[in-house]
Image (cartoon, rainbow, N blue to C red):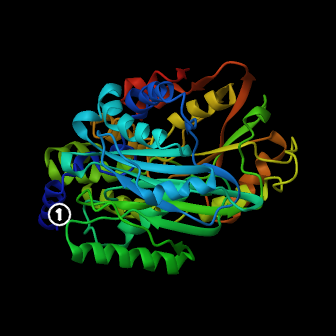
């Protein structure tokens, strides 16, 4: 069995993927804290005199009304671009909303300066076109091949139907489980579910559409991946939008995900107050078992380390398979519960009745709580950090297999809700078979800070991540 997996790992290496880093979720993303956020701050300043706006980080782009059109544009990175006539024709819409994904050569992905050199020429070209564009959500991934760089913009005109809201997100990865074939249905299912996750976090689950971002090293595999997209569409009632593919990158799986809601999304940061509770929809930490399993197959010395902790590879493989099953299914049930506790789009937020804010725990894991504190300008106290498999996550951290064992792909949501409804939300989530928990509360307003249990050190080796918390 191991021989077959090792062959697959070697295949993925030839595609430029790093199986030990598990090219899912945060492992393939350009680092947000060290690179993306500092770079965007400089780019915003460079383009401040143009009608080109990069919105603050949100889980998804939210547009008032029902958006039903999408135009895809694909450009090279690092060179000044000329906007073609097809895009110029979009001038008739006035403002355009956009989500974007860029794939950057790894040499330029480890510093803000390198990242700026690649991104700024493209953004500047779009800005100089005269089009008014709002970049509402950006996603940046890494490639070891300079010829595989690209930037992709999915542009959405302002809706003509003004009722409700449309939520839009892009998430694109390389692979979910490197121990399995790339054509396995769970690979595409996990990637597409991951792209939908950010809009599910907002309680958006109706009229779901996906504009795929898919590529493969052969036409045969590409056709299989696209067939899996269609299969996912039929299985979960999601419409596939016909769009151009980047034809760059040896292996890509993901989509721009779109959904509609007649409720106001939980973006009530200014309503978050003392005493509100933090609810997680289920435990986090999907990536630790995946990384640990693959590392044991590649490095047999880790098997002995694992056995010394009382865990054999057979048990770890079972857990790995459970995690892949979890990742490959959309979190639509949690979205329905969030939707229940939101005000109708034309009504006001009511304290004590409605969820205030939510976020997706995919990618940086527990670090999203610090982002919540900054978004809401509050002090948050975490009681606990619930993990799917705490023992496995702790071992993966101890063996330096993963820098942040709370990170994940297609992960749970954190909900900030008034104390009056917190138990009701938990009960509704449990009734759908989920394992929610109240994990913390807002203890003050006015200065962003997160107080976390000192036990977090057992699951996070990255000192920069730990520095974002006050450990007690």
What percent of the width, then of the height, locates residue 388?
48, 50
From the viewer's side, name the closer residue of 147 and 379. Answer: 147
What percent of the width, then of the height, locates residue 187?
36, 66
Q: Secondary structure at mark 1?
A: helix
What percent of the width, then of the height, locates residue 297?
18, 54
From the viewer's side, name the closer residue of 362 and 163. Answer: 163
Q: Quadrant of residue 31?
A: top left
Tell me what residue is drawn at x 79 percent, y 54 percent. 341
Horizontal side, residue 261 vs residue 100: left or right = right
What percent of the width, then of the height, locates residue 6?
14, 60
Tell me what residue is drawn at x 38 percent, y 34 percent. 120
> Crowding at label 1, few (<14), some or many (≥20) Cα neighbours within 10 Å?
some
In this figure, what is the number of numbered marks? Answer: 1
Horizontal side, residue 207 vs residue 191: left or right = right
Q: Quadrant of residue 270?
A: top right
Above or below for 234 versus 407: below
Tell me what residue is drawn at x 72 percent, y 35 percent. 269
Residue under label 1: 8
Q: Quadrant of the C terminus?
A: top right
From the viewer's side, name the closer residue of 283 and 350. Answer: 350
Q: Quadrant of the N terminus?
A: bottom left
Q: Is residue 410 visible?
A: no
Tell me what residue is drawn at x 67 percent, y 52 percent. 63
Q: Is residue 366 visible?
A: yes
């Amino acid at each position: 069995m191991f021989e077959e997996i090792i062959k697959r790992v070697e295949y993925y290496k030839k595609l430029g993927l790093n199986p030990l880093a598990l090219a899912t979720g945060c492992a393939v993303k350009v680092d947000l804290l060290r690179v993306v956020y500092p770079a965007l701050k400089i780019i915003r300043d460079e383009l401040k005199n143009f009608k080109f706006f990069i919105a603050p980080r949100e889980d998804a782009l939210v547009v008032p009304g029902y958006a039903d059109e999408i135009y895809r544009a694909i450009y090279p990175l690092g060179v000044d671009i000329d906007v073609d006539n097809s895009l110029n024709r979009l001038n008739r819409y006035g403002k355009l909303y956009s989500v974007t994904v860029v794939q950057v050569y790894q040499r330029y992905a480890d510093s803000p300066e390198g990242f700026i050199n690649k991104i700024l020429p493209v953004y500047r070209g779009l800005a100089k076109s005269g089009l008014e564009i709002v970049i509402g959500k950006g996603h940046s991934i890494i490639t070891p091949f300079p010829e595989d760089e690209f930037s992709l913009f999915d542009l959405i005109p302002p809706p003509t139907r003004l009722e409700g809201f449309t939520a839009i997100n892009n998430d694109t990865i390389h692979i979910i489980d490197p121990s399995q074939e790339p054509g396995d249905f769970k690979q595409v299912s996990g990637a597409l579910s991951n792209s939908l996750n950010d809009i599910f976090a907002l309680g958006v689950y109706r009229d779901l559409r996906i504009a795929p971002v898919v590529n493969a090293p052969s036409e045969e595999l590409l056709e299989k991946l696209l067939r899996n997209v269609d299969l996912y569409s039929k299985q979960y009632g999601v419409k596939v939008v016909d769009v151009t593919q980047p034809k760059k990158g040896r292996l890509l799986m993901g989509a721009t995900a779109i959904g509609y809601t007649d409720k106001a999304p939980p973006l009530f940061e200014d309503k978050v107050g003392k005493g509100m509770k933090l609810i997680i929809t289920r435990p986090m930490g999907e990536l630790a078992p995946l990384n640990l399993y693959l590392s044991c197959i590649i490095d047999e010395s880790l098997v002995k380390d694992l056995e010394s902790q009382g865990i054999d590879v057979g048990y770890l493989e079972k857990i790995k398979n459970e995690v892949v099953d979890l990742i490959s299914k959309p979190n639509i049930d949690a979205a329905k519960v969030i939707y229940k506790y939101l005000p109708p789009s034309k009504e006001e937020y009511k304290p004590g009745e409605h969820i205030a804010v939510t976020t997706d725990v995919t990618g940086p894991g527990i670090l999203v709580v610090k982002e919540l504190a900054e978004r809401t300008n509050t002090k948050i106290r975490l009681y606990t950090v619930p993990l799917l498999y705490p023992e496995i996550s702790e071992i993966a951290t101890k063996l330096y297999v993963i820098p942040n064992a709370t990170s994940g792909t297609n992960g749970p949501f954190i909900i900030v809700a008034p104390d009056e409804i917190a138990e009701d939300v938990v009960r509704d989530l449990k009734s759908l078979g989920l394992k929610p928990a109240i994990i913390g509360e807002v203890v003050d307003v006015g200065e962003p800070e997160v107080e976390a249990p000192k036990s977090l050190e057992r699951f996070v080796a990255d000192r920069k991540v730990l520095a974002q918390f006050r450990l007690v």
